[in-house]
Image: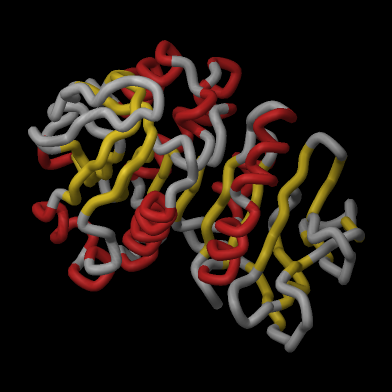
Amino acid sequence: MAPQVLLLQLGSATEADIFKELYAEFRLTIEAKFTTAVARTDAAAFRALENSTPQAVLVVDAGLARQKSGNLQKRLAQFASDGGTVVLGCLFSSFVSPSDLNRLFKKRFGLPWKAGEYHRTTCTLNRTLQSVFGEHVFANLPNSYSMKATHLKDTSMTERVYAPSELSRTESLVFPPAKVDSQQCPAVFVKHGRGFFGYIGDVNNEAGSQTLILAMLDTAINSSLSITTAAMTIDTIARPSNYVDADVLNKNTDSLLLHDMPKGRLESSQEDVLEVQRGPKSEFVRTFKHIRF
């Protein structure tokens, strides 16, 4: 069975619509590579973390950073400490406020990082991080690429995956080129306890950023730092669709029975939705024990 990545989507309806439009193709890429689940409420995320043993969480919008999700923020910090990987990417940097971002870094992950400049410039790969990603994964990353991003300040050189050089300049169709602060960076990836924590500030879904997100998720999987063991029974059958669906919840037991449905959803209510998709072989999950979504 492919390893599992939890996509955390807690943002507004506007964020959901933009993610669906801008990241549809990239989401298919992720689903083809990994077993994925999508949590759209704090409650669904808590249950997924406790029961389905994801190895990585990709936060796709800024909903997590808002104060109402404080308990989930703490849970994700612990998840990373215990060996999981948390990546802030996709629409996260487009919608997060500087104050929410700074609070998340400092209060939940104990990091001095702060929101910095917002501009487009060309950034170069920091080759000292090859040992963090591993040689095979690191080889897939582009040597440099241009991105419009919310940069971070107060990061260390050993944390920066991509950073502008002394020769980097702002790239704008309106304003003339200007020197950028080479000590700020748009992408970081660090050890956090036994796991990892990453941030990608790109706001335009650049191809290089997609490759970077996949590299962070690959690193999570390759680290083999599983956080728990979930009891589940899986039947693998050939199917024409990649989606796993459910419409029967046996409320008298601790089992969730899954059947073919057209929309690819596991749900216990309209407000509490978790989607599950099984990787390239279209594995079909029949029973999850001890899980109630």
Q: Position of residue 159 (x, y in %)?
A: 18, 40
For residue 74, side relative to residue 47 (left or right): left
Q: Decide if residue 84 is in sight here.
A: no
Q: Nearer the viewer, residue 85 or 17?
A: 17
Q: Decide if residue 51 is in sight here.
A: yes
Q: In the rendered view, tell whether residue 152 sits above or below residue 132.
A: above
Q: In the rendered view, tell whether residue 85 sits above or below residue 185.
A: below
Instruction: Give the residue furthest to the top.
Output: 99
For residue 249, side relative to residue 31 (left or right): right
Q: Nearer the viewer, residue 253 or 57?
A: 57
Q: Residue at x 14, y 29 (%)?
A: 182
Q: Residue at x 29, y 19 (%)?
A: 116
For residue 183, side relative to residue 145 (left or right): left
Q: Position of residue 54 (x, y in %)?
A: 51, 56
Q: Position of residue 51 (x, y in %)?
A: 60, 54
For residue 187, side relative to residue 5 (left or right): left
